Image (cartoon, rainbow, N blue to C red):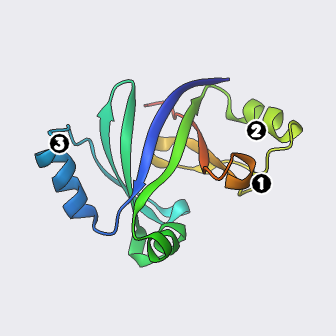
Amino acid sequence: MIVALDHVAIAVPDLEASIKRFMEDFGLTFEGTEDVEAAKTSTAFFPLPPTSIELVHPLRGEGPIAKYLEKKGGGMHHLCFRTDNIEEDIARLKEKGYQFLSDGPSNGAHNSKVIFIHPKSCDGVLIELNQPGEEH
């Protein structure tokens, strides 16, 4: 079942400059960075309980975020909903006709399981489902 808005992701062309902006200009607490090999992204998190802002930047200049930045130059990338059972939610949403960008969940930041719903299933908005890992 969907239990919370986990984070709002913003694609950024310069991760260090964006981290500085959110820390210094907006005064947000910086939680740190993490590379997510499966998604080819570097991430930076700024928790705003009960949710957070995630900055996403292409890892080694490749992957889907690199393509997004080439096309749009940055901006809001996706909404992420936290789930307590990602497998059940995937099955339930597939039964309702939702299309996903992969066959099953992959590893995400913070040892989580993640999957993305195709934007054409959600009025053009990319939606991520995220089941936190044990230490989250």
Q: How crowded is mark 2: few (under 14 residues within 10 Å), some or many (20 or more)?
A: many
Front: mark 3 or 2: 3
For the residue marked with disc 2, what is the amino acid?
Ile
Q: Where is residue 41 in the image (x, y as percent from the top left)?
A: 44, 63
Residue behind mark 2: 90
Q: How crowded is mark 3: few (under 14 residues within 10 Å), some or many (20 or more)?
A: few
Q: Is mark 1 on a helix, strand or loop?
A: loop
Does residue 18 appear left or right of residue 108 in this picture?
left
Label total for image: 3
* Amino acid type of the residue that numbered disc 3 sits on in the rendered structure: Phe
Report the front residue among 88 and 99. 99
Q: Are marks 1 and 3 in contact (CB under 8 Å)?
A: no
Relative vertical location of residue 71 with respect to residue 48 in this rendering, above or below:
below
Counting residues from the start of the chain, the first of labels 1 and 3 encountered is: 3
Q: Residue 26 carries which label?
A: 3
Q: Is residue 31 above or below residue 36?
A: above
Residue drawn at point x = 49 percent, y = 42 percent? 111
Task: Return the residue nearer the eye: 32 or 72.
Answer: 72
Where is residue 81? Give x, y as percent: 56, 34
Check disc 3 and report its element: helix, strand or loop: loop
